[in-house]
Amino acid sequence: MKVVEALGGPITQAEFAALIGVSEAKVSQLASEGVIVRGAPGHTWLLAYCERLREVAAGRASSDGGGLDLVQERAALARSQREAQDIKNAVARREYAPIGLLADVLGKASSAVVDRFEQLEGAMRKTCPDLPDEALATVQKIIASARNEWIRSTAKLVSDDLDALEQSPDDGEDDDASTLGAEGAEV
C-alpha cells in the first residue's frame, strides 16, 4: 500500500521513468504527446501509461507516437496479399501473362499469317493455272486488305492496352512485370 500512497501525489519524470523502466526522455515524450499530464499524481500517470500500452497492443495507437496505424497497415498488407493471390490464380487459369510474352506470341502469329498469305498466289497459280488474272488479282486484293486490317487492328489493340496501363494508377510494379488480363488479351 505504500506504493499506492506514494503515487497519490505529484511525481517527477525521473521517478516515473525509474518506476516503469523507461528513460526520462521517453517520459518526456509521453508528456509532450499528452499521454501523461505534468503535475498530475503518479497514480494518474501510471493509469494513463497502462492505457497507452493497451492501445498500442490493440493496434489502435503507435508506440512511437509517429502516427503508424497498425489497423490500416494490416488492412493494406491483407489487400496486397489478396491482390498477389488473385494474380497468381489468374496466371494458373491462364488468364494473365507478361506483356512481353503476349507481344512475342502476337508477333509470331501475325508473321505466320502473313507468310501464308504471301504463298497463296504461287499456290493458286500452280493449283489453278486456268484462273483468270482478274480473279487472281481480286483474291490477292482481298487478302492484302485482310492482312492490312489484321495489322491495323493488332497495333490498335496493343496501343489501347498500353495506354490503359499508363493511365492506371501506379501500384509500384515494374513495367517489365506488368500483365494483361483476360479483358486485355487472352493467352
Image: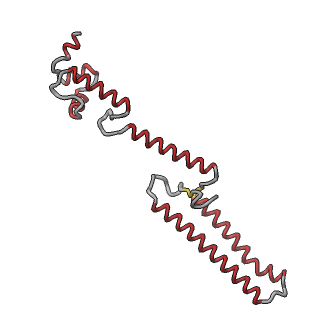
Q: Which of the image's four quarters has the N terminus?
A: top left
Spot occupied by residue 160 in the image (x, y as percentages of width and height): 52, 67
Specify how the rendered protein is coloured. secondary structure
Horizontal relation, residue 20 to residue 117: left or right = left
Q: Is residue 35 above or below residue 80?
A: above
Residue sitting at 60 percent across and 55 percent down?
A: 97
| Residue 56, quarter of the rendered image | top left
Residue sitting at 64 percent across and 65 percent down?
A: 106
Q: Is residue 2 above or below residue 78?
A: above
Pick the front one: 116 or 50: 50
Q: Is residue 135 above or below residue 102?
A: below
Q: Is residue 186 above or below residue 56?
A: below
Residue sitting at 84 percent across and 85 percent down?
A: 129
Pick the front one: 112 or 45: 45
| Residue 103, quarter of the rendered image | bottom right
| Residue 183, quarter of the rendered image | bottom right
Spot occupied by residue 125 in the image (x, y as percentages of width and height): 81, 83
Horizontal relation, residue 84 to residue 133: left or right = left
Number of labels in the image equals: 0
Spot occupied by residue 107 in the image (x, y as percentages of width and height): 64, 67
Horizontal relation, residue 83 to residue 1: left or right = right
Horizontal relation, residue 72 to residue 96: left or right = left
From this viewpoint, which residue is outermost toward the top? 1
Spot occupied by residue 18 in the image (x, y as percentages of width and height): 24, 20
Residue sitting at 59 percent across and 57 percent down?
A: 182
Pick the front one: 74 or 110: 74
Q: Which of the image's four quarters has the C terminus?
A: bottom right
